[in-house]
Amino acid sequence: MVTSPFRLGLTLSTAILLGASVAAQESRPKPHVAPSGRVTTSVTFDGRVTRGGGWFPGTPSHSGPSRITIDYGQPHARGRTIFGGLVPYDEVWRVGANWATRLTLDLDVRIGDLDVPRGEYTLFLLPRETGAELIVSLETRQWGTDYDPSRDFGQASMSRRVLAEAAPSMAITLEPNLGGENEEVPSGTLRITWGTVEYFADWQILWP
């Protein structure tokens, strides 16, 4: 069978067009997912501190306007050993991923044994096999690995416990106590959980 020059040319043109189309598709930019997302955790209160140091209940609900807020990058284990592995003991860690973990206080707060005035701070963690130190830094809005010890405001001791089931993603939570009218001031527990380890410390509002 003899193929006509016209049909041969058409076949070659089709092949070239198909090849160009595939090459164009392969060269087009594709979306990529970031390995770590950003998470915000907070507790809210039903008012704000007045200039004279009193409490103004600005809303009848418990939706604000005063808050304790922690904003952090959330890494994932993906089968890795976390504390004592990916995160070495006895070394300062960004307690998160990417940009530094930010603590914002609308009220004066005691975290563990450290009194922290309202303001904006950066958090780091010094994990150990028996506990940890939560480092509160005055330097803010930096990359997470940019730690300057000369800018430390202070450190709060945290306890440690081993979890029965591993947490695949790092989580920071501010768990409030709901003592109702029997509770003198709002308080709760700050937890840092990842892998099979949880570090935790009490927090409470500093009130005259």
Image (cartoon, grey):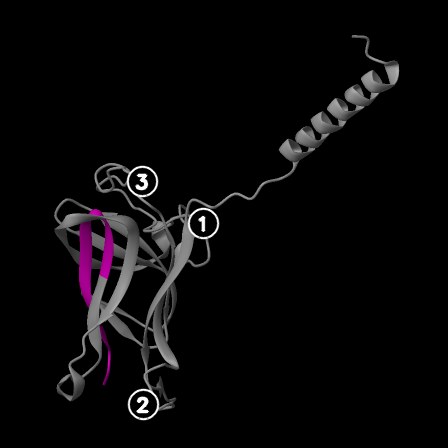
Q: Earlier in the sequence, mark 1 or mark 2?
A: 2
Q: Quadrant of the N terminus?
A: top right
Percent across and percent down for residue 178 are 18, 79
User: Of circles 1 and 3, which is in front?
Assistant: 3
Amino acid at circle 3: Arg
- State the residue in front, 72 or 125: 72
| Point 87% across, 19% down: residue | 6
Give the prevailing secondary structure in the magenta stretch. strand
Percent across and percent down for residue 45 are 31, 81
Q: Are marks 1 and 3 in contact (CB under 8 Å)?
A: no
Q: Please say whether residue 207 is visible from this viewpoint.
A: yes
Graded by Cα atoms within 10 Å as few (under 14), some (14 to 19) or many (20 or more), the crowding at tag 1 reads few
The residue that label 2 is drawn on is 55
The residue that label 1 is drawn on is 143
Q: Earlier in the sequence, mark 3 or mark 2?
A: 2
The residue that label 3 is drawn on is 78
Determine which quarter of the picture holds residue 12. Answer: top right
- State the residue in front, 134 or 7: 7
User: Of circles 3 and 2, which is in front?
Assistant: 3
- State the residue in front, 41 or 22: 22
Q: Give the magenta range.
A: 191-208
**Count of numbered circles on the image:** 3
Amino acid at circle 2: Trp
Spatial CA distance of label 3 from label 2 is 46 Å
Q: Please say whether residue 102 is visible from this viewpoint.
A: no
Could you tell me which secondary element the residue under label 1 belongs to? Answer: loop
